[in-house]
Image (tube, rainbow, N blue to C red):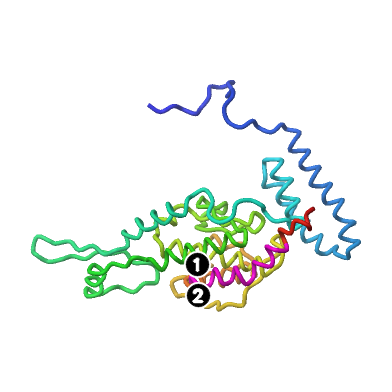
Amino acid sequence: MGLSNKLSPGLRPTGTGPPKPAWWLGRLSLLLALALLMVAAPIAAALNGAALFGALAASALPLLLRQRSPLPLAEAIVNRLSGRPYKGPAGLVGLQESVLLEQLAKADQKWLPNAELLANGAIRYTYRRRAGESALSIGQLRALLASPPGYRPERQAIVNLLAALKSVGIRVLVTAPRRPAAVGEWDPLLRTIFIQPQVVARGSVGFAQVLNHEAIHGAQSCRGGPWPLAAKPLGLATTMPASLAAVLQEPLYRQASALERQLEREAYANQALLHLGPELLRRYCALVLLSSIDDKYWR
């Protein structure tokens, strides 16, 4: 019998779980955020940067409504207004790379065809098809059974992508994105890529493409300048495969702006080119990282 986490009416847990912040901390955080805006305004005006300040302030205020924990809220607003980056572990966090690769290798086995001998002596072949793949002939299925693919190029691409993301200070978490129905999400403020755990079940091919897609978004943010600023397209091809032609019509993108659709179209059109992610990160993110983490700048 499992233990219930529910408490009887009127009872409160004692000594379990983190303490809840006092009510006044939330108001203190709000006052701190407003004070930051007031202090930064004359500085921005003196530097002839009122327009930039206004854009950053407008992007920071929604955090007041999204965050519950006072201290992360204050830190997030400071980061948003100053362009100060997330400073923490980069690369794959919370899951060992070797464990991830083992899970992907196991999932890859589900994409191999099966041959079933029927009572009448005939052989029935069954297999799974990815979106956009053509149907396989009996000869192709027999060839796959005789020499199954190892998906080593895709797993090596994942290793290369994770290394490139780590080198430019971007974190990867295999956990549910905050946006409903999203399989992956890039958060420029947190400098974090979220990947839905169910993507691992897609195998090396599916996981590599989702990771590459989000890495392209990271490069788009880098091209836009310091991370709190708007992302910019990279000038890549934007012709999407036929299998993805309708993806931007899904509810997930219903409220997306024209720029957001352009960024998504560029990422979808190039997500299967697994060599692109590391190249784009090195090209656009290295200088942004160096300028962001200069200790003298923050001293």
3D distance between C-alphas at marks 2 and 1 = 10 Å
Q: Nearer the viewer, residue 226 or 38?
A: 226
Q: Which residue is mark 2?
A: 240
Q: Which residue is mark 1?
A: 247
**Mark 2 or mark 1, which is nearer to you?**
2
Q: Nearer the viewer, residue 213 or 99?
A: 99
Magenta residues span 274-291
Judged left or right of residue 233, residue 204 is: left
Q: Are marks 2 and 1 in contact (CB under 8 Å)?
A: yes
For image coordinates 44% across by 65% down, the residue present is 156
Judged left or right of residue 223, residue 269 is: left
Amino acid under label 1? Answer: Val
Which quadrant of the figure has residue 214? bottom right
Sequence-first tag of 2 and 1 = 2
Residue 299, image x and y in percent?
79, 53
Residue 232, image x and y in percent?
66, 70
For image coordinates 50% across by 70% down, the residue present is 271
When the figure is inspected, residue 223 is found, relative to residue 194, above or below; the finding is: below
Residue 175 visible in image: yes
